[in-house]
Image (spheres, coloured by chain):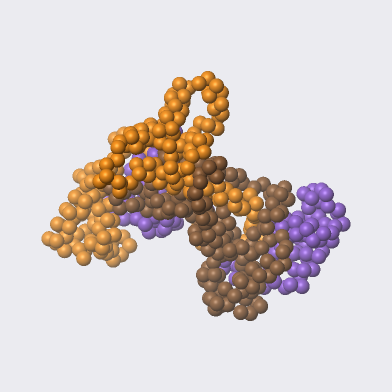
Chain colours: A orange, B brown, C purple
Amino acid sequence: MSNDIYKVKLDNIFEGPMDLLIHLIQKNKVDIYDIPIALITDQYLAYLEWIESMNIDLAGDFLVMAATLTYIKSRMLLPVHDDEKDEEDPRTEITRPLIEYLQIKSVAEKLADRKIFGEHIFARTPCKADLSEESDKLYIHVGLFELMEAFKNIFDTLSPEHRVDFSEDRMSIKDRITEIIEILEEKGSVIFCDLFPEESAKSMLVVTFLAILEMVRLNLLRIVQHTPTGVIRLFYI
Amino acid sequence: MTEELKNIIESLLFVADSPLSPDRIRKILPHAEFSGIKQAIDQLCDEYESRKGGFTLTEVAGGFQFRTRPEYSEWIKRLIQPHPTRLSKAALETLAIIAYRQPIIRSDIEHIRGVDSGGIIRTLMERKLVRILGRKEIPGRPLIYATTKQFLELFNLKDLKDLPTPREIEALTDTK
Amino acid sequence: MTEELKNIIESLLFVADSPLSPDRIRKILPHAEFSGIKQAIDQLCDEYESRKGGFTLTEVAGGFQFRTRPEYSEWIKRLIQPHPTRLSKAALETLAIIAYRQPIIRSDIEHIRGVDSGGIIRTLMERKLVRILGRKEIPGRPLIYATTKQFLELFNLKDLKDLPTPREIEALTDTK
């Protein structure tokens, strides 16, 4: 065993169970469509043991795969009855995802082999002479990612009582929609602000607003405002 | 198509900072026929192709852009400091999954790779190669991911159909 | 002067963001003769001059640069977007608060950020990312703010529900 350990190089620390499995299949030079499941399973488990003995934390994914392999191995040992002949080879459960993963790997390699823009191929850098004059039409360069980061920064500094549990809100949006529809069925229309009574909790305001947005999306509502600062009224369609 | 139209389009392609589609050019030149624009672009592509100079007119990300020929990258890199573009193996794999299976949710990506991929998706989003397309209407309403135009631009791809096809997996041992 | 040298110089002139002098080119291509470089530039100038296309190679500020011909500036101006403006960190934070907490009144925004935010809200409104939804019926009747359709367009979102939730943000931005 000690000899084996010396053979393990640093790049043999696999990123995931799929990588490890493919390594084992290649090392044993076996056909992916006819995997000797007992052999591969044993080597897989031996590797996990070795990793654990090195005090390296194992991701749960490796253990899930170990369980899958052991299960397949046990099914392969069961005698096949005549009425089960048509049943799928238990190994398909692992063969199919492996082939899919291999295809992705081959495509990723092909992408890496392409001529990369900014590495092999370049375009012009528009120079200042091209941009004759600045127009007052502004356009903003920002991505959703930046917005998310900004919110996360804010969120981290918030005291717990300021945080809104979004999962709870989701549940209550549907309820709120029902309540609003009841009001509309009775009255035909409602003033926007009336749906936000001042005594209601902050989370309730958010839920109501999201409910209204959802109703607009579902084409249940028409929102009318005659002047820019006038009363906003919701009509039931 | 007139010679002037061709020249105008050439100057537009020359100053644009991203690939221009015929549609976009049409919006700038409303008096021009769509067919004339297409014809002018084709002719420009041919001219630069047969000229075999320092750059060509390339179809990429649904548009056209003047791009240098890869042969001279060594010298160009001495002139300008390129931004590092290297993607890790894991990032490339994740990107390939999103490119081929889009629109796709995170759990499907992780199912194929067999490992948690949140950090890598974040990196790909940061580099604007991947974006959020919306939410899938299943329990939990997970976010749906897709590739961006910048993804096509980076890999010099005309469109998603231009993606390389996966290698046939026959005998695994061949892939070493 | 070889054809290849001419092509390399052409690609350098093409990617450069300012005029290139023969001296500068010489530093990039140390194996080339100075006379060869001059000759190549002259030939390129002639080629583009006689071609009469959308741009020419012009001597400017002690160097050479590809420039569009002035005849087409009218069309080029239609294409060129003004410089993209970035949102400041403070603006982005305020926008994020409004996006996630809308409908929200100014004092609540300021409570979260801990600083006066009137100016920033005004800027966001000028950029049409934030709008006034109405007034809250509490003493002082403060204005209620929400995001706009342009906000959704800017971030490529179908609707507000597509905004990643705090938990999803956590999951993606945790680099572990």
Residue drawn at (27%, 44%) of the image: A82
Q: Which residue is at the front of the view, B30 or A91?
A: A91
Residue C10 visible in the displayed image: yes
Q: Residue furthest top?
A: A2
- Residue displayed at 30% across by 53% down: B137
Look at 45% across and 30% down and name the residue there. A43
Outermost residue to the front: A82
Q: In the figure, residue B35 lies in which quadrant? A: bottom right
Number of numbered callouts drawn: 0
Query: Which part of the image, by quadrant, shows the C terminus of chain A?
Result: bottom left
Rendered position, C25 above or below C76: above
Instruction: Specify whether residue C110 is in view.
Output: no
Q: Position of residue C158 (x, y in %)?
A: 37, 57
Residue at screen point 53% across, 20% down: A2
Left or right: B31 with respect to A76? right
- Residue lying at the far left of the rendered structure: A186
Location of residue C27 with respect to B23 vertically, above or below:
above
Foreground residue among A33 and C128: A33
Q: Is residue C57 above or below residue C25?
A: below
Q: Position of residue A95 (x, y in %)?
A: 41, 44
Closer to the camera in the image, A198 or C33: C33
Relative to B147, A237 lies left or right? left
Q: Where is residue A230 shown, x and y percent of the image?
A: 28, 61
Give how far across and how far down residue A22 sits, in percent: 48, 39
Considering only vertical position in the picture, is A151 above or below C155? above
Horizontally, residue C161 falls left or right of residue B11, namely left
